[in-house]
């Protein structure tokens, strides 16, 4: 397995996509599990399958369509990923983040990232939204980082700061949008814990995350955010809380992927309203 990406691979994918689209996207959107319906709202849609794009990974997860949708959403030129990539699929970290670098070469300035996450914070309920203000990447701290290997100065510096990636102004605008749509009481700002998966977390692991400041947990997003920070793309991330994490050893319930997809389906319309209205305000 390669330990770093090839700049030529990214250029090859971007140049291929330029031949398929008529308008360069200004905004990128990454759809999480059960949330790909947002891409179906794109007007003047031009769909490109991941399998047709040179050097592009393939999505293998249920609930991920595995295609890019270019077109207009809320009057803005967008590039929507219906399906993303995860550590547990066996990809190197650089390949999970490759689409972000492709977005950079296509002209994307802001990427909106959604994900399905388990609620660790005891005040979070199924169906709530959480705007990410930060993340704790257990995978990244353990060395699974998309920037591992020789640095590509064409994209960014050797030692980029990740903290500014969760743009303060975008978070405030997103939260105001949620309040204006009547979602204020169920929209939080919190810290996302990134784990590798694919097994769900143990009670002990979840209690550790709670104690160190985690509010929600999921198996994606951190690699994409690090890559975006590296190449200067602003980020706004929102989690849909699809299950309440089990923090008690006496509990009789356990998380499952079907619950994640079902909650995504049930709250899909609200997430779509939130993203489309947010785009209007950008």
Image (tube, grey):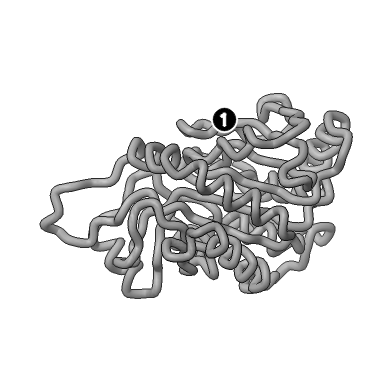
Q: Quadrant of residue 156?
A: bottom right
Q: Report the residue at 78% width, 45% height from top.
A: 75
Quadrant for the C terminus in the image? bottom right
Q: Does residue 154 appear left or right of residue 192 in this picture? A: right
Q: Residues within 10 Å of mark 1 (few under 14, many from 20)?
A: many
Q: Which quarter shows the N terminus?
A: top right
Q: Is residue 120 above or below residue 20?
A: below
Q: Is residue 18 above or below residue 273?
A: above
The residue at 64%/58% (across/down) is: 148
Q: Nearer the viewer, residue 40 or 116?
A: 40
Seen at 57% across and 45% down, the residue is 272
- Residue pictured at 76% horizontal, 29% vertical: 46
Q: In this orientation, does residue 102 appear? A: no
In the picture as drawn, the residue positioned furthest to the left comes out as 250
**Residue marked by disc 1:** 65
Label 1: element kind: loop
x and y percentages locating residue 21 in the rendered image: 84, 33
**Residue 33 horizontal/vertical position (percent):** 48, 41
Q: Is residue 74 left or right of residue 153?
A: left
- Nearest to the observer: residue 121 or residue 250: 121
Query: Would you say 71 lies left or right of 37 here?
Result: right
Residue 119 horizontal/vertical position (percent): 36, 58
């Amino acid at each position: 397995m390669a330990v770093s990406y090839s700049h030529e691979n990214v250029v090859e994918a971007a140049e291929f996509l330029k031949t398929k689209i008529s308008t360069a996207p200004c905004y990128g959107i990454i759809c999480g599990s059960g949330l790909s319906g947002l891409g179906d709202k794109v007007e003047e849609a031009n769909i490109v399958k991941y399998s047709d794009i040179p050097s592009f990974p393939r999505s293998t997860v249920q609930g991920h369509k595995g295609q890019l949708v270019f077109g207009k959403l809320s009057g803005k030129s967008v590039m929507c990923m219906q399906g993303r990539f995860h550590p547990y699929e066996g990809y190197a970290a650089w390949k999970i983040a490759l689409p972000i670098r492709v977005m950079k070469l296509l002209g994307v300035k802001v990427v909106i990232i959604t994900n399905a996450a388990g609620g660790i914070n005891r005040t979070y309920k199924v169906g709530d939204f959480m705007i990410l203000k930060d993340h704790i990447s257990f995978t990244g701290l353990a060395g699974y980082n998309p920037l591992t290997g020789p640095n590509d100065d064409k994209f960014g510096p050797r030692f980029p700061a990740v903290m500014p990636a969760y743009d303060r102004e975008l978070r405030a605008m997103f939260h105001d949008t949620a309040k204006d749509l009547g979602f204020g009481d169920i929209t939080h700002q919190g810290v996302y814990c990134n784990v590798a998966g694919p097994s769900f977390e143990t009670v002990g692991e979840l209690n550790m995350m709670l104690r160190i400041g985690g509010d929600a947990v999921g198996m994606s997003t951190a690699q994409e955010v690090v890559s975006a920070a590296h190449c200067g793309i602003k980020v706004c991330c929102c989690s849909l809380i699809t299950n309440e994490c089990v923090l008690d050893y006496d509990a009789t319930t356990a998380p499952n992927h079907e619950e994640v997809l079902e909650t995504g389906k049930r709250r899909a319309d609200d997430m779509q309203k939130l993203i489309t209205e947010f785009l209007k305000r950008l």
